[in-house]
Each structure stands twice: as structure tokens, then as C-alpha cells.
């Protein structure tokens, strides 16, 4: 049953990681163990991210599904709508703080915005969406471990893999304990950590998404944007420009961060109009 799986997996995974890390002196000495380069692992992580049978979860995908569900309910899902509106207000306030040079306050506001988005997703899509997200991250981890099994990897990769295992274990645990919002956070964290094995890939994907969502936001407001919407779209465009520049300069983490902030602002506009 489900309960059993939820608890058996993390232990099994831990055992696999111990095997995969191969840095303990106690590990059996295997002749000609091939060291998998970080680049090879990055390219494999990209394949997992794109794989239709793994279905690694993403917040963007869940937000899109939430919007569809809210539309289908004819604005009946008041709780989800309230959470998404709060998320937009907080994301805008975070950008105000950034412009005012108060990055500490901006970080806190972004965290709160993210929390509301998770609550909104669970309110819109229900627990089965969280079950799917956790399963997707488990599948991604299993695929990654199967690839690394029997190979040596750099210390950095072993460390990052251990963090993915921890995140998947927490997601399973919180889901079993009836805490879907927290479980969703850990499942998304695990998926993002798998994607992060290739920073260039996630930057490129996020820039593409941010571009799409700006188009949706512009279409949603038509020629009658409110002052707040116009400001959000202006900022989203500026951040997308920054993301492009950072990407060209090969600063992929910064590029991803700027594109992510851009998408968050555009999403707020789109969701505000969905209800």
C-alpha cells in the first residue's frame, strides 16, 4: 500500500546514495570505475527534465493547471483565487523593496508569495496533484540514481544528489502525514535540484516561459490595463531583458533568477484576470 511505500523508499534511496557516492574508504574498490563528468550528468539531468514518462513537476505547470481549473469552475474556487491574488500583491511588493534597495525585505515577501502560490495550487487542484508531483520527483531521482549507479561522481555531485534524496524523503513523509502543501514544496524542491544539475538548461527554460507568460499577460489586459498591471508588465519586460543579458554572459543562475521574477509578475497579472 501507499503507507508502506512512503516509508520504504527513503531508506532504499539512502542505501543507493551511499553506494553511488563512492567516497567512503569502506566502499569496495572496483577496478576501472568510470568517473562520470559533471557535464555528462548535466546532459542526463536535461533528459530527465524533458522526459514525458518521468513527469518531473514544475510550479509553472501546476499554476497553468490551476488557472484552467479555476476557469472551469467559473470563478467558484474562491479560496484558490484569494491565495493567487495575495501571491501577486506580495510579488509586487517584493519588487518595490528591490527597487528601494531593501533585498532582505524582498526575500521575505517573495517567500510569502511562494507560500500563497503553493496553497493556491492545492486549493485549485486538490491532493491528487500533490501525489502526482511527489511521484514525479521520485521517478526523476530513481532515473538519476540508476544512471549514476556503479560510477564514481565528483564530491559536489554526491552532495547535491544527497540533497535530492532528502527532499524526496521529506515530500513522501509530509504527504503521508496529511500535509499536502509542505509535501508539494519538497517535491518541487527535489525536482528543481535535479534540473539544477544543468544550470544552463533551467535558465533557458525559464527565459522561454517568462517570454510566453508576458505575452499572455499583455493579451489578458488588452488595451485597458490598470496602473498596477501596466507596472507589473513593464517590470516583467525589464527583468526578461536582464535575464537575456545574464544568459549571454553565461551567468546562468542570475539569468534564471531574473526570468523567474519576471514570470512571477506576469503570472500575477494573468491570474488576476482569470477570476
Image (cartoon, rainbow, N blue to C red):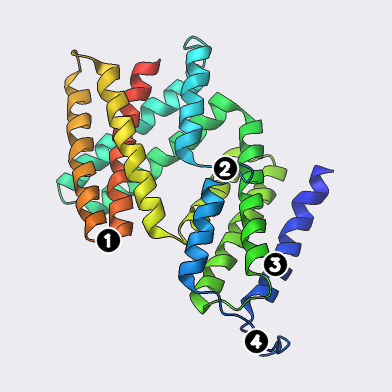
Q: In the rendered image, which residue does mark 2 sit on?
A: 184
Separation of marks 3 and 1 at Cα, in angstroms: 33 Å
Q: Nearer the viewer, mark 2 or mark 4?
A: 4
The structure residue drawn at horizontal position 23% and vertical position 14%, both measured from the top left corner, is 222
Q: Nearer the viewer, mark 3 or mark 1?
A: 1
Residue 267, compared with residue 24, is above or below; it is: above
Q: Earlier in the sequence, mark 4 or mark 1?
A: 4
Residue 31, compared with residue 181, is above or below; it is: below
Q: Earlier in the sequence, mark 1 or mark 2?
A: 2
At which x and y percent is residue 28?
73, 87
Mark 4 residue crowding within 10 angstroms, few (<14) / some (14–19) / many (20+)? few
Separation of marks 2 and 3 at Cα, in angstroms: 21 Å
Q: Earlier in the sequence, mark 2 or mark 4?
A: 4
Say which element carries label 4: loop
Q: In the rendered image, which residue does mark 4 sit on?
A: 32
Name the side, left or right, on which 7 lies relative to 227: right
In which quadrant of the rendered image does the C terminus lie? top left
Say which element carries label 2: helix
Q: Nearer the viewer, mark 1 or mark 2?
A: 1
Separation of marks 4 and 3 at Cα, in angstroms: 24 Å
Name the side, left or right, on which 264 lies relative to 222: right
| The disc label shown at residue 251, or none | 1
Separation of marks 4 and 1 at Cα, in angstroms: 35 Å
Amino acid at each position: 500500500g501507499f503507507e508502506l511505500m512512503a516509508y520504504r523508499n527513503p531508506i532504499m534511496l539512502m542505501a543507493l546514495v551511499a553506494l553511488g557516492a563512492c567516497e567512503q574508504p569502506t566502499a569496495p574498490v572496483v577496478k576501472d570505475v568510470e568517473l562520470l563528468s559533471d557535464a555528462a550528468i548535466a546532459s542526463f539531468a536535461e533528459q530527465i527534465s524533458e522526459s514525458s514518462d518521468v513527469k518531473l513537476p514544475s510550479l509553472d505547470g501546476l499554476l497553468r493547471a490551476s488557472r484552467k481549473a479555476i476557469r472551469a469552475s467559473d470563478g467558484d474556487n474562491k479560496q484558490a483565487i484569494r491565495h493567487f491574488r495575495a501571491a501577486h500583491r506580495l510579488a509586487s511588493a517584493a519588487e518595490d523593496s528591490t527597487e528601494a534597495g531593501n533585498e532582505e525585505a524582498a526575500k521575505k515577501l517573495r517567500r510569502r508569495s511562494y507560500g500563497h502560490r503553493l496553497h493556491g495550487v492545492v486549493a485549485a487542484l486538490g491532493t491528487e496533484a500533490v501525489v502526482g508531483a511527489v511521484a514525479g520527483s521520485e521517478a526523476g531521482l530513481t532515473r538519476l540514481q540508476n544512471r549514476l549507479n556503479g560510477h564514481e561522481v565528483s564530491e559536489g555531485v554526491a552532495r547535491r544528489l544527497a540533497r535530492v534524496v532528502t527532499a524526496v524523503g521529506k515530500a513522501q513523509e509530509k504527504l503521508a502525514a496529511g500535509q499536502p502543501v509542505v509535501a508539494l514544496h519538497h517535491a518541487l524542491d527535489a525536482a528543481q535540484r535535479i534540473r539544477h544539475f544543468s544550470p544552463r538548461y533551467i535558465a533557458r527554460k525559464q527565459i522561454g516561459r517568462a517570454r510566453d507568460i508576458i505575452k499572455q499577460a499583455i493579451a489578458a489586459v488588452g488595451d485597458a490595463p490598470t496602473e498596477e498591471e501596466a507596472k507589473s508588465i513593464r517590470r516583467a519586460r525589464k527583468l526578461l531583458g536582464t535575464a537575456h543579458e545574464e544568459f549571454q554572459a553565461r551567468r546562468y543562475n542570475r539569468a534564471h533568477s531574473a526570468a523567474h521574477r519576471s514570470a512571477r509578475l506576469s503570472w500575477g497579472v494573468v491570474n488576476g484576470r482569470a477570476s
